Amino acid sequence: MPSDPPLAEFTAAYAPDDAALAAELLVTAALPPDREARIDPLATELITAIRGSEHGLGGVEAMLREFALSTKEGLALMVLAEALLRVPDAATADAFIEDKLGQGDFAHHRIKSDAVLVNASAWALGLSARLVHAGETPQGTLAALTKRIGAPPVRAATRHAMRLIGNHFVLGETIEAVLARAQAQAREGSRYSYDMLGEGARTAEDAERYYQSYADAITAIGRSAGNAALPARPGISVKLSALHPRFEAISRDRVMRELTPRLLELARLAKHHDLAFTVDAEEADRLELSLEVFAACFADASLKGWDGYGLAVQAYQKRAAAVIDHVAELAGALDRRMMLRLVKGAYWDTEIKRAQERGLADYPVFTRKPMTDLNYLHCARRLLTLRPRLFPQFASHNALTVATILAEAGNCDGYEFQRLHGMGEALYAQLLAEHPQTVCRIYAPVGGHRDLLAYLVRRLLENGANSSFVAQAGDDSVPIDELLARPAALIGNAENARNPAIPLPRDLYQPQRLNSRGVELGDRSALAALLGEIEDARRTLPTLASATPEQAAAAVRAARNGFESWSRTSADHHAGILRRAGDLLEQRRAAFIALLQDEGGKTLDDGVAEVREAIDYCRYYASEGRRLFGEPLELPGPTGERNTLALRGRGVFVAISPWNFPLAIFLGQITAALMAGNAVVAKPAEQTPVIAEVAVRLLHEAGLPREALQLLQGDSRIGAALVEQPDIAGVVFTGSTEVARAINRTLADKDGPIVPLIAETGGINAMIVDATALPEQVADDVIASAFRSAGQRCSALRLLCVQDDVADRVIAMIAGAARELKIGDPRDPATHVGPVIDAEAKARLDAHITKMKREAQLHFAGTAPTGGNYVAPHIFELRRASQLTEEVFGPILHVVRYKAAEFDDLLDDIAATGYALTLGVQSRIDDTIARVVARLPTGNVYVNRNIIGAVVGVQPFGGSGLSGTGPKAGGPHYLPRFALEQTVSINTAAAGGNAALLTGQN
């Protein structure tokens, strides 16, 4: 029997141009006059109903009216809601409550609403705020408060406010409670879709737990679903990222192998009960993978004859219409029906940030809200034409959108509206009163308060922004006519499609410089093209000869001769060469990634990131150099005198770079010294000579005179020989603290000028996690910080300090997430952890692991491939932070627990190491963050994020103490350290008097 033809693969430009899309959308935006005329009356009635609904319990709209996100109270409430109920211990909860209530004037807040929910919440928060005096320290306030009434009433009142809010937006904490409440509240004919709350899976255990909760929920919903036929039956939404711990594009083969059968099992169970089953939307970089899993499951013959399988599509994504067409084609090819839920999208800010961080050509989402609204209506129109093959489900709380869809459809057949539980009640009550045949499904979250309130915060952010219809509809000062303005009219023409306040990722740092170009690994075509280019560029690594001490002396002499001419060329000329070098690096990205993989053991994402960093160094130092080394700085002084301060090169700089960033740090050191007008002798790490050789050739190709840059290969003896040369003007070094000390002693022992040493060394980098931190975010950030690049970054996490009250859960999640990492060949795009640099490094790390197994508690030991220099991730728990006395340069994480009352002791232990390079703080308490920053002089402090990947010009990198001398690489104070300062004072009145003063006396 012949096999079925393969399903069409989804193809669409990842981030197309806004103007081109707008031109297409604007052409099709207009409705026939008779349908257009129906929109305003209905939308006006719906808005009037919303504004007149200030009674009863109230909803999100009422909360937003009372505590707008543009106010301090609204922002404080949002952070309290997101974190408070997951804090188990009283001390942290008390500090958190005080920290947030002190940021808003809850004590004097005048309650405007008569909704029960808002009144009760505002009263509880106001009571807490009156008990807590803003401006005092948590310790002082809570101590005084406890003497008066005890801390528990404050805690209880605030927790009560959070639970009160939460109870209104969740149907129940279990599916059984939800179904009982839904049946009690449901009007005849109403429909529900249930969303099992929770973050995406980080561990296999998470994925199994979510799978079981979905399966149990489907069974329970099916038992109580009654006898109605689809689409008039309840449904459930399933999040693919909850069902697999590595739901990411680079793990595509594993995801298809492991996740697709699990999704199919759930779909079969939903089919058995004839329920609606929606695969939820994910971020843009997961869209292609989501559609591949979705299609593979849908194509299974066991689902034939069932119309409940469905997909959620986000209209803020520029590919939304292409997704709809793809799904329609898929349904047609299989001769089946399916449901499609159209939403506007909830993670717009995240998508914007990711595109900027990744250096993409454009954004995968629209940057103006009217464009999203316009695209939503375009997609809605397309869906209506695809009935009955697709059953459209329009999720919206926008009265204009609802009225437009109703006018476009012309009737109420073959589609439904959807609203979130706790939102849109007045709008849809009015709509159903006007059009009884209309159907609205309620999308209801199910889960505990800890998961619920993080979900609620996202809804508040999504609907509470000033541009949101929900926020504007609740504001009586906004004229209704303003709310009726059509998206097409707000855009006007295609040139207005883009938000001018949001630059393209490429232009993020303009006018100073271009952002380096990245690649989206979730864009199948871009990934395939890059991998092809890398393979085409891959070459056998040559063997390079090591220099001799005599050649070191000769190189310094040659560089000294080159300095004379190089130092006399202009800053503009220097900057031009650096910019051309950056452009050449970008053009030859694939060749350098291949080198970084083959010689440096870098994974694909690390290779992309390192090439981008090298490009950023070239462009940043070119921009800074023109500013600093161009025209002299004019200084104030008395009349008849001109005073200037100028920077100029020192002479010959020796640049000694490490193997862990053999391109970025190598070029960063060299380009900084060159931009400052120095000649350079560069000595790269002995493990990565070819990368340095090719990089130097590129600099010469960009226009750098050969005499301005000398390259010497070799081991530490060549570096020592260079440092000993009497004619050098400075040393820039990245490496170990021990070698930096040796260089410092050598320089100090020489007669002659006292020359600068710019050293960046390592660190026992810590991350502090308190009980307010989100465990899933902590797990993501720790995994990246400790194990990316096989832990071979100066900034990598070595010591994780977790508050004892949450330590068991956090450590277990991190260990489970580490278990899902793939260790292996760095040329495989699916690899997360590659090899360590050489056999010597592996032996040193293996010895430390053996020692830790004797002295510490083992939480996780990964399995490394046999052969090669692989060291698997390990996690050990120490008794105290002071047990870790030196940097362990590899994928080994050390963990300590601390009690909230001993927080200052923990900070003392971290300070006592003497290192001060990078530090992470995971907390929602601003006062805690401020205490850490004030106490520890760490060079780079990262709050609620990972601690690696410092971006040039954005997070200047470097530490102090045992971690280096400063100034920070990639920062505004770096280049002057390579330069001499020269003041010139000219008596302009020397030739006969001050003519300028005399001619201007009248």
Image (cartoon, grey):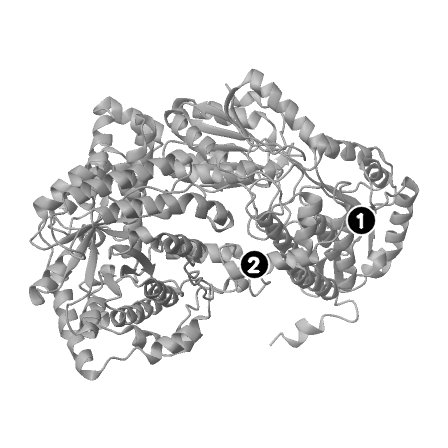
The tag on residue 912 is none
N-term-proximal mark, 2 vs 1: 2
Residue 702's x, y, as percent? 75, 63
Residue 345's x, y, as percent? 33, 58
**Residue 814 versus residue 765: which sits nearer the camera?**
814
The correct choice, above or below, for 96 with respect to 877 in the image is: below
Give me the C-alpha separation between circle 2 and circle 1.
Answer: 27 Å
* Tag in front: 2 or 1: 2
The correct choice, above or below, for 486 with respect to 693 in the image is: below
Dot 1: what SS?
loop
Give the residue type that dot 1 points to. Pro
Q: Given the current orientation, which residue lies at the most extreme front position? A: 1
Determine which quarter of the picture holds residue 535: bottom right
The correct choice, above or below, for 804 with respect to 172 in the image is: above
Residue 262's x, y, as percent? 36, 43
- Can residue 147 be seen here? The reply is yes
Q: Residue at 35% x, 42% y: name it.
A: 199
Label 1: few (<14), some or many (≥20) within 10 Å?
few
- Can residue 980 be seen here? The reply is no
**Residue 873 versus residue 383: which sits nearer the camera?**
383
Number of marks in picture: 2
Left/right of residue 402 with respect to residue 287 in the rendered view: left
Q: Which residue is mark 2?
A: 528
Residue 769's x, y, as percent? 43, 32
**Residue 204 versus residue 596: which sits nearer the camera?**
204
Q: Given the current orientation, which residue lies at the most extreme top position? A: 854
Q: Which residue is mark 1?
A: 542
